[in-house]
Amino acid sequence: MTADRSKRAQVARLMSGKGVVLMFPDLQAVRTLLFDDTGASAARETDPVALGRLVVDQQRQQASWAGRALPLTRLERDVLTALANPPLRVWTYQQLYERVWGADYLDDAAAVRSTVKRLRAKLREANATIAVEAARGVGYSLVDTTSHGRHWS
């Protein structure tokens, strides 16, 4: 546990592929992980997010498309909430990681990519007309797949 971001990055590089390492900037982050099952609740929106037929209600820990519940994990729901919050924009890997995981981003986008991959599959299964689009090398944005210009109406 250290507040020094460079030290955490150094440990992550040294341990890469050798096991699981949990790193925390401070004791509060440890307590949040161990005792607060909502994770980085301070960074989350409390009002439901509605975008077309998508509704994400963080208070109830639910997401739905066209009135049908989406079986999302907390991480998937939090990524979707971030992407759906106005103004719609491209979220960098760092912005998504820090918002959803509530920790410093250590230049490893694997967790974000994995979560987005699962989220995309679940949106396709629900026949949603929204999709998570990659901005290559930058991050992700939410798009309307029914519109030619991919703008929200």
Image (cartoon, helix red, strand yellow):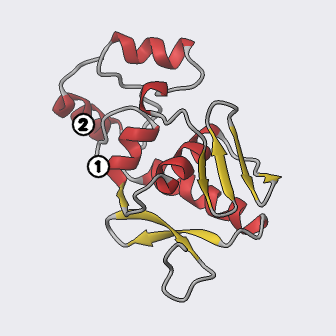
- Classify 10 Å Cα crowding around label 2: few (below 14), some (14-19), many (20 and above): some
Q: Are marks 2 and 1 in contact (CB under 8 Å)?
A: yes
- Spot occupied by residue 134 in the image (x, y as percentages of width and height): 44, 70
Per the rendering, the mark at residue 46 is none
In the image, 116 versus 123, the foreground residue is: 123
- Spot occupied by residue 36 in the image (x, y as percentages of width and height): 55, 16
In the image, 138 versus 87, the foreground residue is: 87
At a point 68% along the width and 35% down the height, the residue shown is 61
Query: Which residue is tagged 2?
Result: 9
At a point 48% along the width and 55% down the height, the residue shown is 83
Mark 2 lies on a secondary structure that is: helix
71 sits to left or right of 138: right
Image quarter in which the C terminus is found: bottom right
Location of residue 97 by image quarter: top left
At a point 77% along the width and 65% down the height, the residue shown is 125
In the image, 84 versus 131, the foreground residue is: 84
* Residue at mark 2 to residue at mark 1: CA–CA distance: 8 Å
Location of residue 8 by image quarter: top left
Query: Which residue is tagged 1?
Result: 107
151 sits to left or right of 72: left
Q: How many marks?
A: 2
Looking at the image, is 15 positioned above or below residue 121?
above
Please name the amino acid that badge 1 sits on.
Answer: Asp
At a point 49% along the width and 36% down the height, the residue shown is 45
146 sits to left or right of 125: left
- Spot occupied by residue 31 in the image (x, y as percentages of width and height): 46, 11
- Spot occupied by residue 77 in the image (x, y as percentages of width and height): 61, 45
Mark 1 lies on a secondary structure that is: loop
